[in-house]
Image (cartoon, grey):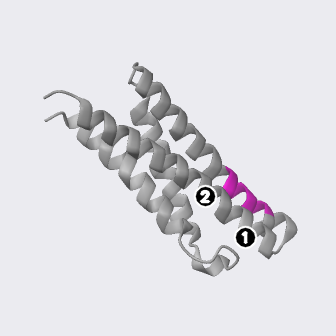
Amino acid sequence: MNMHKIISGSFFILAMTVNFGFFYGEPTVLEQHSSYELFAAIIVNLIATVLKLGDRTQLGAVLLATSIVADIQLIASATVWAFAMYVIGDVNIEAATAIVSLSGGALLANIVSVILFVGDTLKSKR
């Protein structure tokens, strides 16, 4: 077994599932979305991005791109939340929807990453 593949795959899937945990719920009700879970999703996605840095294949470049997209969208989601909370002073429905929608885009990028990773694993020779 390749230990790097096991650890990387675990973090790719963990990034997707933690992101889904934050995304799941009514988009306009921010009480259904934990700020701690968004923070965890950002951290796990950043770790997954670092794990993708060493791969110099074409697939590795695509995996890195999907991870960077997920990072940008999750950080943007947290930025919108912080801006609405501390600058505007209230997280209205529009801000809540933007926060959850941005994490949905990151979730989609994570799903693409996991599908590509599983596909590459299935086609690799033993």
Is 79 one of the magenta-colored residues? yes
Residue 103 numbered mark, or none: 2
Q: Nearer the viewer, residue 63 or 83?
A: 63
Residue shown at the point (13%, 29%) measured from the top left:
126
Magenta stretch: residue 60 in it? no
Q: Main secondary structure of the magenta part?
A: helix
Q: Identify the amino acid type marked 2.
A: Ser
- Horizontal side of 45 relative to 90 (left or right) equals left
Q: Which residue is at a point 49% across and 43% down the rendered structure image?
A: 46
Location of residue 51 (image quadrant)? top left
Q: Position of residue 53 (x, y in %)?
A: 44, 28
The residue lying toward the viewer, choosing from 79 and 26, is 26
- The reply to whether residue 6 is visible in this rendering is yes
Label 1 amino acid? Ala
Q: Position of residue 56 (x, y in %)?
A: 40, 19
Structural distance between the alpha carbons of marks 1 and 2:
11 Å
State the extent of the magenta-drawn residues as a range.
76-83
Mark 1 burial class by Cα count in 10 Å: few <14, some 14-19, many 20+: many
Q: Is residue 21 left or right of residue 33?
A: left
**Above or below, comparing residue 1 to residue 18 in the picture:** above
Q: Is residue 91 visible?
A: no
Q: Secondary structure at mark 2?
A: helix
Q: Is residue 40 left or right of residue 10?
A: right
Disc 1 element = helix
Q: Are marks 1 and 2 in contact (CB under 8 Å)?
A: no
Q: Which residue is mark 1?
A: 96
What residue is drawn where x is 78% and y is 75%? Answer: 93
**Position of 61 relative to 121 (above/below):** above
Mark 2 surroundings: few (<14), some (14-19) or many (≥20) residues within 10 A: many
